[in-house]
Image (spheres, grey):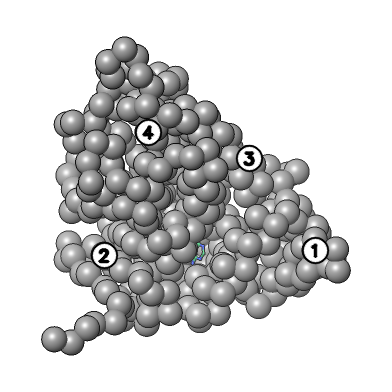
Amino acid sequence: MQAPGPARRAILAGVVLVGLLAMAGAVRWVATPGVPELGAAAGGQKASAVVQRGGFVMGSYVQITASGPQAAAGVDAALHEVRRLGALFDRFEPSSPVAQASRYAGTSAVEVPPEVAELARLASALAGQSGGAFDPTVAPLVDVWGFGDEYDHHPPQAPPDPARVERARALVDYRGLRLTRAADGSWRLGLDREGMALDLGAAAQGYAADRAIAVLQEHGVASALVDVGGEIRALGPRPGSDDGWRVAVRDPREPDRYVTTLSVRDGAVATSGDYERFFEYQGRRYSHLLDPRTGEPEQGIASVTVLHPSAAVADALATALAVLGPEAGLELLEQWQPARAMLVTTAGEVLWLDARPRIEP
Ligand code: AMP
Ligand code: MG
């Protein structure tokens, strides 16, 4: 996810609002005219107010929009929850549970909070179903390719030495991730071999979007949109209408153009793209979406957008499908109905994959 420039940062730092285009890394949501402006209701009634707040979490822009009487309190609490989860899943913060599990790889399992256990379970399930194309222990490969912590300051200039890639690839194996639950209900996460490391970054933003929606619902909010670095979850209709929220999917090669606009209500849209973190070398693009089976960045898919009721699932599937491509991707989608996906190939083709059962006339 690319950080916005200073001007944009300034605009988005505080309480902002409504009726405008809101930029996210991969996706834009579009609020159409007719959305009531904050404070525009007669007599300052807050019931119709739309509240929108944002901030940065783990290098990505987060934006939460909600309407209704409890919207302001709900949005604040939801943002707080996203920040809390961002800290848990930050593998570059040495004290985070994800970093601790990696630190003790090959030595001992560490206790992790239920949120980390839940996402690790989802990621492990997807890893098995995808034959390891998706793998939550991909971290050594991410780092050797230069897409880790240093990417923002020192983006890589060239592919790493093949011997280093091979050493990193040999450490990537989801079957070495052990999750156990103790009698008291606590979770422990262990990694079999020294040098292995956990990376839940392929689904953490979607997971945080799901949690933010749950917090908003606890506040009685019935209409909201949560955008965590381009992974989006919608609740209820768009304010002032019976329709869903409009989510526009970015053209992976033309940031100012959309491939399509989706209407989303009570569901999630997540996008993975080869334009988020990448470098070019000798005319070829190398992206952060890595295929653990080869050790190389995926080739041929520019972006994948997945629709699913859960943002965590949509987020994980989007990353998985970028690596798997359309045929194997459709097989994986069949196991996650009612998932749908839109792939944009590097040749510019747009492919829709829909695994939902068809009702024959
Ligand atoms: P996303 O933007 O959701 O597609 O997540 C991309 C991030 O997922 C990368 O920056 C890596 O940290 C991680 N990742 C890359 N390749 C894989 C993979 N094959 N399986 C799981 N996670 C991956
Ligand atoms: Mg993802």
**Residue at figure coordinates x 42%, y 21% from the top left:** 15
Labels 1 and 4: the sequence-earlier one: 4
Residue 265 picture location, percent across and down: 31, 52
Q: Residue at position x 27%, y 15% from top?
A: 42
Residue 38 image point, x, y percent? 33, 21
Q: CA distance from mark 3 to mark 1?
A: 21 Å
Q: Nearer the viewer, mark 4 or mark 3?
A: 4
Q: Earlier in the sequence, mark 4 or mark 3?
A: 4
Marks 3 and 1: which is nearer the front? 1
Element carrying mark 3: helix
Would you name the residue on which mark 3 appears?
A: 84
**Front in this rendered view, residue 200 or 29:** 29
Q: Is residue 77 above or below residue 262?
A: above
298 vs 186, nearest the viewer: 186
Whole-angstrom CA distance, mark 2 to mark 4, is: 30 Å
Look at label 3 and name its amino acid: Arg
Q: Secondary structure at mark 1?
A: loop
Type of residue at label 4? Answer: Ser
Q: Earlier in the sequence, mark 2 or mark 1?
A: 1
Rendered residue at 80%/61% (across/down): 186
- Cα separation, mark 4 vs mark 3, equals 23 Å
Q: Against 295, is 244 above or below?
A: above
The mark lying in front, picked from 2 and 4, is: 4
Amino acid found under the numbered disc labelled 2: Met
Q: Is residue 140 visible?
A: no
Task: Give residue 351's quadrant in the image.
Answer: bottom left
Which comes before the other along the chain, label 3 or label 1? 3
Q: Which residue is mark 1?
A: 185
Please name the residue that numbered disc 4 is placed on. 67
Mark 1 → mark 4, Cα distance in angstroms: 37 Å
